Amino acid sequence: MRLDTGEGVLSLTVPVHAEQDRLPGDPGVWLFITADVFVFGLFFLLFSLGRVAHPALYERSRLVLNPTLGLANTLILLTSSWFMVRAVTAAREGARRRVMRNIALAMAVGSVFAVTKIIEYSAKIHAGITMLSNEFFTYYFVFTGIHFLHYIIGMVVLMICFHKAKTQPIDGNYVVWIESSGCYWHMVDLLWVVLFPMLYLLRAA
Amino acid sequence: MGNISEFKYWRFCAWNGPVFMFVFIAFWGLMGHNIPPWNPETPAAVVANWFRADANLIRTGMVMGMTFAVCYCVWGLAIGRVMGKIVGKDSLLVDLQVWGAGLTVVPLLVSTSFWLAGAYRPAALPDEILQLLFDWAWLLIDLAYSVTTVQLFAAGVAFLQDKRPVPLVPKWLAWYGIWVGFMFIAECLMPFFKTGAFARDGILNFWIEFSIWFVWAPLLTVYILKAITRLEQEARG
């Protein structure tokens, strides 16, 4: 993908090639991400086991969810992540204004996720559906709730990235910061990309 | 450091961590029937009969648990001293970690006292009261997670600031500790469920939550002991 001008692409080629042997960001963040993905993997396993045990209940409950909002949230998070990729690229090139602009866009688009989630949760609660309604909705509220918590932390991290970009030099330390933040933000996408089809789309066999 | 011999006290404090872990597994956990705990749907009569039949076992387990609960705070002081060599002894992070470790002792002491109260005169108490004491103790010990989270976050953030070529505590362990502190939030689900993964004996709220802490704490102790040795060698010049 050509994200930038010819100058930008040229300057990207060398560092990206040279960086192929290293993980982006702080390696410690990857431990955090791996541990988190492991726990969500366990969640997905629990859900699958429950679904096998009670297919009719899961199917009936799934049909109550709004897949359009789920799809909208998927697109929102992926778009936000795309702006984050652009921000990381800009940081590697030391382009402060582009870094700030792209982080601002990532936050602006990402903030819509909170709006749609609140709409979705409110609709369920008004319809009398809660975490205690049945096993499907226990998992629905708990998994998406914990994911939402990850999202909030991600938004705070993006704000810190923006503030650092505004007040501190765009140097090697900042690149590690923004790469780590970007990896975390992508994990938030990744988890949602699995949660969305699992909760909203997967039909009973 | 002015007095080199001070390090032996650091080391002593650090060893309080393993002592605490051993006592809590053996006495609070196995002897006190908390590994795993009674399922919340267990009838009150079953829990009450256990209190009555195993009263002396439970009394011993909880007396030991209460006696050694303070080891957690002492262990936190050793961690705080090592943190002080990274972020400075006046850093707020050191205070947060030490307070987090110290305050963790409070729910440990109070909840073990509930189990002990149940085992004190179980024949004179109705089944539901004994069940309540068991439930209450578990609600407290699980829902007091946030004080321990303060400790985990403060320690993690401090260890991430270590500028040594080989940090005293590895960065991955710092991140892991932060993650464990974050994961404790799942304990908030526990009061809402009596069965399944989020109940007090469930795979998430018991097995995963306790296991991830029991990976962090021994590993941190190993690195704290190594760090003390390194700091002692540096001080000796």
Image (spheres, rainbow, N blue to C red):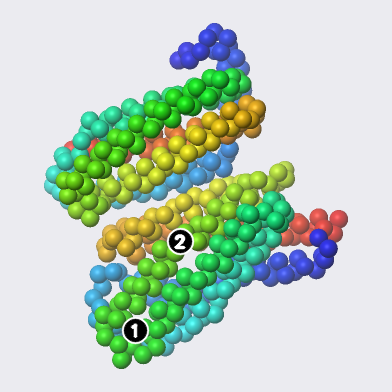
What residue appears at the point 61 percent right and 21 percent down from the top-left corner? A94
Residue A193, x across and y down, in percent: 34, 34
Mark 2–mark 1 distance (CA, rounded to whole Å): 26 Å
| Left/right of residue B35 with respect to residue B163 in the rendered view | left
Residue B22 in view in this figure: no
Residue A9, x across and y down, in percent: 54, 12
User: Residue B14, relative to residue A7: is it above or below?
Assistant: below
What residue appears at the point 54 percent right and 41 percent down from the top-left corner? A29
What residue appears at the point 71 percent right and 57 percent down from the top-left corner? B89
In the picture as drawn, the residue positioned furthest to the top comes out as: A6
Viewer-nearest of discs 2 and 1: 2
Say which label, 2 or 1, has the lower sequence index.
Answer: 1
Q: Which secondary structure, mark 1?
A: helix
**Quadrant where the C terminus of chain A is found in the figure:** top left
User: Which chain does the numbered disc 1 sit on?
Assistant: B
A11 and A148: which is toward the camera: A148
For residue A21, the mark is none
In the picture as drawn, the residue positioned furthest to the right comes out as: B237
Identify the residue under disc 1: B51
Residue B67, x across and y down, in percent: 54, 80
Identify the residue under disc 2: B145
What residue appears at the point 16 percent right and 41 percent down from the top-left corner? A64
> Is there one chain holding both mark 2 and mark 1?
yes
User: Residue B29, relative to residue B150: is it above or below?
Assistant: below
Q: Residues within 10 Å of mark 2 (few under 14, many from 20)?
A: many
